[in-house]
Image (cartoon, rainbow, N blue to C red):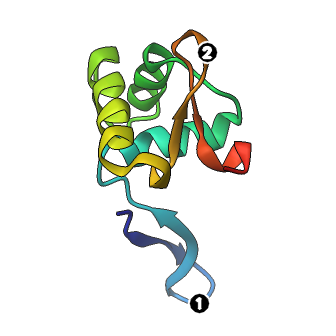
């Protein structure tokens, strides 16, 4: 489950910090997969997901780790999983299908 963190910036005119942006904390490999898929908006392979997660400094994982986490989530949660496997080993968010 993702936690909420607020990014605070220094306000030089008021001489103090203020809350400026809400940021979601990445607590698991599945959180990172969801975030990358939401940002991209298209189904992607585990290889691409892993590379983007590392490039964005969200999570460090291999292609195998990503695939195993996604498959395990579907195995454990079934239709309640946030993810769905598409053709050619691509993965998408279930909400995109409306199912």
> Residue 14's quadrant in the figure?
bottom right
Q: Quadrant of the N terminus?
A: bottom left
Residue 43 falls left or right of residue 71 = right
Report crowding for label 1: few under 14, some 14 to 19, many 20 or more residues within 10 A (C-alpha): few
Which callout, 2 or 1, points to the residue nearer the camera? 2
* Residue 8 seen in the current view: yes
- Kindly identify the residue that appears in the image at 57 percent across and 78 percent down: 12
How far across and how far down the image is residue 3, in percent? 37, 69
Marker disc for residue 92: none
How far across and how far down the image is residue 38, in percent? 63, 44
- Report the label total: 2
Viewer-nearest residue: 94 or 59:
94
Viewer-nearest residue: 31 or 72:
72
Q: Is residue 59 above or below residue 27?
A: above
- Kindly identify the residue that appears in the image at 46 percent across and 34 percent down: 56
- Kindly identify the residue that appears in the image at 34 percent across and 16 percent down: 63
Viewer-nearest residue: 29 or 93:
93
Residue 74 falls left or right of residue 40 = left
Q: Is residue 65 above or below residue 82?
A: above
Tags 2 and 1 touching, CB below 8 Å: no
Q: Secondary structure at mark 2?
A: helix
Q: Identify the mark nearer the N-term, 2 or 1.
A: 1
How far across and how far down the image is residue 7, in percent? 48, 69
> Residue 20's quadrant in the figure?
bottom right
Viewer-nearest residue: 41 or 76:
76
Report crowding for label 2: few under 14, some 14 to 19, many 20 or more residues within 10 A (C-alpha): few
Marker disc for residue 14: 1
Q: Residue furthest bottom?
A: 14
Marker disc for residue 87: 2
Q: Secondary structure at mark 1?
A: loop
- Kindly identify the residue that appears in the image at 38 percent across and 59 percent down: 25
């Amino acid at each position: 489950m993702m936690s909420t963190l607020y990014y605070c910036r220094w306000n030089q005119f008021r001489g103090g910090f203020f809350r400026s942006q809400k940021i979601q904390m990445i607590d698991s490999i599945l959180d990172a997969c969801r975030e990358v898929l939401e940002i991209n908006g298209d189904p992607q392979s585990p290889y691409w997901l892993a590379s983007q997660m590392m490039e964005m400094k969200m999570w460090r994982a291999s292609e195998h780790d990503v695939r195993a986490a996604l498959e395990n989530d579907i195995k454990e949660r079934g239709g309640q999983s946030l993810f769905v496997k598409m053709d050619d080993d691509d993965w998408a968010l279930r909400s995109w299908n409306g199912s």
